[in-house]
Image (spheres, helix red, strand yellow):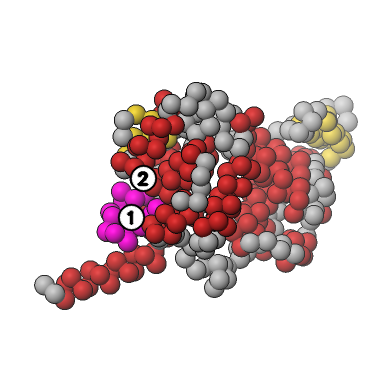
Amino acid sequence: MSVHYDKQRKTWYAQVKIKDNITGKIRTYKKRGFKLKRDAQAWEQQKRSETSHTSTTFYKLFLENLSISNSNEETKQKKIRAIEMYFPYKDIPIDKITKLDLLKFRENLNLATTTKNTIISYVKAVFKYANTFYNVPNISEVLKPFKKSIEELKPNDVWTIDEFNQFISSVKHPVYNAFFHTLYHTGMRRGEGIALLKDDFKEDRLFISKSMKHLKQGFKPPKTYNAIRDIKLDNVTIDKLKDLMKIPGNFLFGGDTSLPITSIDREFKQGIKLSGVKPIRLHDLRHSHATNLINNGANIVAVSKRLGHSDINITLSTYTHLLKKSEDELVKIINNM
């Protein structure tokens, strides 16, 4: 408590020192002449509330919260870009942002449902942080998540093995051919494949311990602890990777440098065009792998571990439509017993 009695004036006075966690500066507020101690205490409490971060802009609090988060640098940059691009009130003092402002922000998000909900979560995190540490009212409860449309709830597009074989026969470059083949037959993520070094390939296994988006950004840890894993390989994939080992350089795919994302996307789209198969995203090679395994009776726990999911519930929710089909097969088995 910074409340004291002034013996000469026979009154109470209060003094408040507030540190701005963003600038690091300390400012002192002082008031004398209170006849009662409780009045001085009330003034002190009010002044602390008034001089909290309510006058600080949303963006400064966002950066403050981000600086103490456990997010990796790539994720931090992703959050910064999202707030700068899509939150129109970022430069306004947080106490001046109204519930109506937040509703307008939500209404004007013209993006995919998952992206919209992700950006909303970033905004809500700042209000929660400001409320926890600076007693700023948390008005972000008005930001309700969006529900996916019927179109978005449809299962991911995947390729059957015949469709993939039709596609891969059109990819003539041996490195990109092996890269797409490995993604389809292991279910690994693009960044995990790009980051593979030759030392990560041992006999019949690939060791996934890192990821990469751009060479200049270097390696980064995998998305989750469970993403660190060994993946056992089929014979065809082993043979393709053995051929790559003969190319000079440390990277399994690319040799001296990792494969550029722009080149991967170009080769993938070109292969689709030349082969005439239905277009899918590169990430759908991962979904294709999981779908093929589950449709052929693979254990869902084993599939989850192979994909490197942080929680089996992610696998269950992503491929629940396939599990329903499996349940029908179980009933057929029971009926025939």
Q: Badge 1: how crowded within 10 Å, few (<14), some, or many (20+)?
A: some
The numbered mark, 2 or 1, whose residue comes first in the sequence reads: 1
Q: Which residue is rendered at x = 76% and y = 47% of the image?
A: 84
Between 334 and 269, the residue placed more toward the observer is: 269
In the shown orientation, is residue 170 left or right of residue 333?
A: right
- Secondary structure, mark 1, is helix
Q: Which residue is rendered at x = 64% and y = 29% of the image?
A: 216
Where is residue 155? Give x, y as percent: 47, 65
Q: Is residue 320 above or below residue 10?
A: below
Q: Is residue 192 magenta?
A: no
Where is residue 172? Give x, y as percent: 51, 44
Where is residue 300? Give x, y as percent: 31, 54
* Residue 221 visible in the displayed image: no
Q: Which residue is rendered at x = 50% and y = 37% of the image?
A: 175
Q: Badge 2: how crowded within 10 Å, few (<14), some, or many (20+)?
A: many
**Kind of residue sitting beneath label 1:** Leu
User: For the C terminus, which image quadrant?
Assistant: bottom left
Dividing the picture into quadrants, the one containing residue 313 is bottom left
Where is residue 234? Give x, y as percent: 31, 43
Mark 2 lies on residue:
306
**Tag shown at residue 293:** 1
Q: Is residue 290 magenta?
A: yes
Between 77 and 243, the residue placed more toward the observer is: 243
Q: Magenta segment range?
A: 289-305
**Kind of residue sitting beneath label 2:** Arg
- Secondary structure, mark 2, is helix
